[in-house]
Image: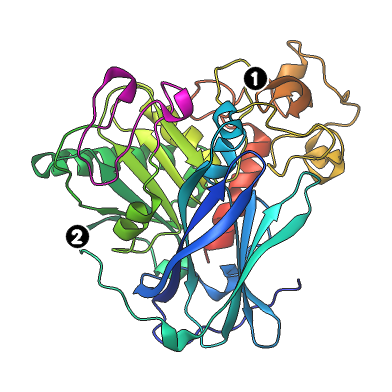
């Protein structure tokens, strides 16, 4: 599908929101629409409406009456990770997902795609759009704090902090945690090059209880976003399955990307490309967690480690090139960081003191010691090291920020 950029009409802040469920198991992946309605928080400029990064496990496109694509979003989600777990071989589940599309009278249909095992896009579902059928939905409103605003929403990367596990009395603590997280982001390279390109806001939404769930300890809390450790059986994996509630909170403000700060000093977090980023707010490694998980959630970077405990099994097909810009199977390395290598660099690159001073092609990454290669001996996407993105991760991050901003 060839995509073009068209002007969006009606209220410039309006979006068409589609809430749906992704259903199935290891072998089945299907879409079930929940509801479609209009809300008012568009932050997408016309130049960034059609995503051309080709990242993510899923893609959603809006098509006009002429068959032209006027919106595209690639993303990954909890479901695409869950279906690679052992549990997905034993049961069916459904996970909440959602998309917001800049409102346009020209939208005729919305098409859902999935990336197949050979990296080709396969159509999953197509729905016809009749805009007269959709009404504006009344969602609960919360105060929004402007932490750092450097320009119009449609001309900047808009990062929105959401709280979970902060009681009403703890909301000042949440604001402080947001400011800390913002400062960690802006102090880390290459984000520090774009301080005038990123807006930061926070939605001040209280929870009944303080802190997240610890189901492996029998601790369950009543919180606004229902965050929980022990996702997919991994104790440090801190996420939420209530994505529609996340989107409801995010509807209070502009949000190109959502970071959920969770009120805990335990180590944990998660990140999914163009979906959300989550991090414990007060762990001694929270500066690293915010940057690492933002690498996943905002920038589409893959994990470069291969020894830690993870829930997924055989996540990468060694016969195709991963879509993540910082991982390669060498199937199509020319599409990755080949141009950043010094002349004469061995491929694969042996790990030694001299080679580790530069960009290379080092075996081990993407949860596999063999068959997947990373660009650096060490990187924030590999080890617990704050402000240590390798040059490949930096290049990729710059592209994402420039995509959103003017």
Q: Closer to the N terminus: mark 2 or mark 1?
A: 2
Q: Position of residue 354 (x, y in %)?
A: 76, 14
Looking at the picture, how far across and down is residue 324, in whole percent? 68, 41
- Provide residue 270's location: percent of width, then percent of height: 46, 35
| Residue placed furthest toward the left | 169
Cβ atoms under marks 2 and 1 closer than 8 Å: no
Left or right? Give the position of 120 relative to 131: right
Q: Residue furthest top?
A: 353
Q: Does 256 sit above or below residue 387?
A: below
Q: Is residue 336 left or right of residue 38?
A: right
User: Camera-side residue: 105 or 143?
Assistant: 105
* Residue under numbered circle 2: 142
Q: Residue at x 78, y 48 (%)?
A: 119
Name the spot of residue 154 as percent of width and height, x first. Answer: 45, 70
- Place residue 200 in its image quadrant: bottom left
Q: Quadrant of residue 250?
A: bottom left
* Secondary structure of residue under mark 1: loop
Span highlighted in magenta in the image: 212-239
Q: Tell me the SS state at disc 2.
A: loop
Q: CA distance from mark 2 to mark 1?
A: 41 Å
Q: Is residue 228 a member of the stretch shown in magenta?
A: yes
Structure colour scheme: rainbow
Q: In terms of secondary structure, what is the magenta stretch mainly? A: loop
Viewer-proximal residue, 62 or 215?
A: 215
Q: Which residue is mark 1?
A: 306
Q: Residues within 10 Å of mark 2 (few under 14, many from 20)?
A: some
Residue at horizontal 48 percent and vertical 47 percent from the top? 94
Q: Residue at x 50, y 22 (%)?
A: 385
Label tally: 2
Above or below for 377 versus 132: above
Seen at 70% across and 87% down, the residue is 66
């Amino acid at each position: 599908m060839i995509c073009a950029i068209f002007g969006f009409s009606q209220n410039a802040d309006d979006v068409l929101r589609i809430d749906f469920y992704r259903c199935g198991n290891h072998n089945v992946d299907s879409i079930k629409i929940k509801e479609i309605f209009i809300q008012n928080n568009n932050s997408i400029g016309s130049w960034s409406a059609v995503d051309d990064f080709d990242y993510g496990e899923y893609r959603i496109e809006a098509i006009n009456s002429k068959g032209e694509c006027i919106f595209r979003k690639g993303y990954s989600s909890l479901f695409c990770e869950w279906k690679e777990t052992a549990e997905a071989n034993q049961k069916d589940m459904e996970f909440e997902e959602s998309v917001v599309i800049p409102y346009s009278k020209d939208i005729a249909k919305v098409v859902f795609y999935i990336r197949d095992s050979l990296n080709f896009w396969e159509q999953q579902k197509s729905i016809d759009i009749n805009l007269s059928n959709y009404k504006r939905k009344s969602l609960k409103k919360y105060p929004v704090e402007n932490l750092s605003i450097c320009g119009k929403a449609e001309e900047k990367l808009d990062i929105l902090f959401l709280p979970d596990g902060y009681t009403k009395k703890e909301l000042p603590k949440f604001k402080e945690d947001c400011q800390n997280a913002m400062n960690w982001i802006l102090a880390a390279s290459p984000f520090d090059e774009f301080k005038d390109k990123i807006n930061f806001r926070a939605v001040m939404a209280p929870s009944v209880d303080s802190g997240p769930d610890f189901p492996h300890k029998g601790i369950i809390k009543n919180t606004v976003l229902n965050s929980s450790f022990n996702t997919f059986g991994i104790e440090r994996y801190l996420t939420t399955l209530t994505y529609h509630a996340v989107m409801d909170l995010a509807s209070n403000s502009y949000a190109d990307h959502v970071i959920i700060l969770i009120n805990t000093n335990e180590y944990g977090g998660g990140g999914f490309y163009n979906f959300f980023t989550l991090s414990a707010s007060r762990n001694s490694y929270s500066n690293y967690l915010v940057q690492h998980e933002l690498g996943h959630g905002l920038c589409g970077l893959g994990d470069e480690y291969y020894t830690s405990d993870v829930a997924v099994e055989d996540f990468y097909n060694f016969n195709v090139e991963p879509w993540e810009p910082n991982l390669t199977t060498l199937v199509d390395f020319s599409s990755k960081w080949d141009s950043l290598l010094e002349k004469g660099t061995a491929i694969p690159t042996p790990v030694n003191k001299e080679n580790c001073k530069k960009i290379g092609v080092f075996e081990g990454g993407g949860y596999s010691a063999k068959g997947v290669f990373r660009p650096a001996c060490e990187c924030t996407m590999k080890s617990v090291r704050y402000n240590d993105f390798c040059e490949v991760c930096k290049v990729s991050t710059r592209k994402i920020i420039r995509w959103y901003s003017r």
